[in-house]
Amino acid sequence: MRVAVIIPAAGLGTRMGRGGAERAGTSRKQFMLLNGEPILVHTIRKFASVPAVSEVVVALRADDQEWARKQLAAAAIAKPVRLVTGGDSRQESVQNALTAIDPSTDLVAVHDAVRPFIEVATIEKVIAEAYQTGAAIVGIVPVDTVKKVHRNKIRQTIPREHLVLAQTPQVFRYGLLYQAFSQARIDSFTGTDESSLVERLEQVEVSVVPGSDRNIKITKPGDMDLARLFLAQESGQ
């Protein structure tokens, strides 16, 4: 089984602000430093440790690629890492990366650049599920009560057992994901994640593999404090 991993990392990270990220030489959150290395490198290293992963393809803005190459060279990642030019949106970035992948690849996993604390065991579980079913994502059940509202008025309380908060990685058969992106382009459809593109094909049911609340998406300055804590715990410090 050959699995290619796509990491869209062309975003501007406007929610993070311009403070801490500039210490890494850029204003993008995926390049902020954790223990001296960019968040992106920590994320890539998790996938590089998975035997089934054959390569990692990172979609970046053109003006970030030289800097990223230097960081990756210094990190000495165990698996091949290729850089492609990202688009103006996440969907465009993933599509650009997808077209650069060998069609003989069995599965494609898409993962957020700023989720460096995904557990290797979870990666392996979602890959195994997608290999069996064709499509699988990582998700967690919300712990808070969820309300459906109109403006500021509650219209419905939604049972939590019917809800999942989608995380990444999201893993699909190569041909299925390629078809989903092609159809979205034809229909001018923009999805909120890769699964939403696959779901609308109505060819397979997307499975959900339980994730973890540690699989945080670093999007705000306050998330960095939690990220440093998690990294220290992983390092046994």
Image: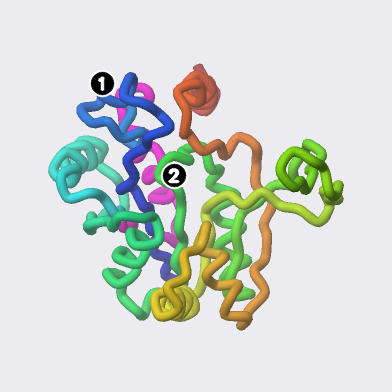
Amino acid type assigned to the residue bearing label 1 in the image? Arg
Q: Is residue 203 left or right of residue 40?
A: right
Compared to residue 132, the image places residue 193 above or below, namely above
Seen at 26% across and 21% down, the residue is 23
Q: Earlier in the sequence, mark 1 or mark 2?
A: 1
Q: Secondary structure at mark 1?
A: helix
Q: Image point 27% across, 54% down: which residue?
A: 81
Q: Nearer the viewer, residue 149 or 28?
A: 149
Can residue 80 be seen from the camera position used here?
A: no
Q: Position of residue 67 (x, y in %)?
A: 16, 38
- Residue segment shown in magenta: 34-57
Q: Position of residue 75 (x, y in %)?
A: 26, 37
Q: Which mark is residue 23?
A: 1
SS for callout 2: helix
Q: Nearest the camera: 137 or 220?
A: 220
138 with respect to 8 (left or right): right
Residue wearing tag 2: 46
93, above or below 185, in the image: above
User: Where is residue 88 shown, x and y percent of the image?
Assistant: 30, 55
- Kind of residue at badge 2: Lys
Which mark is in front, 1 or 2? 1
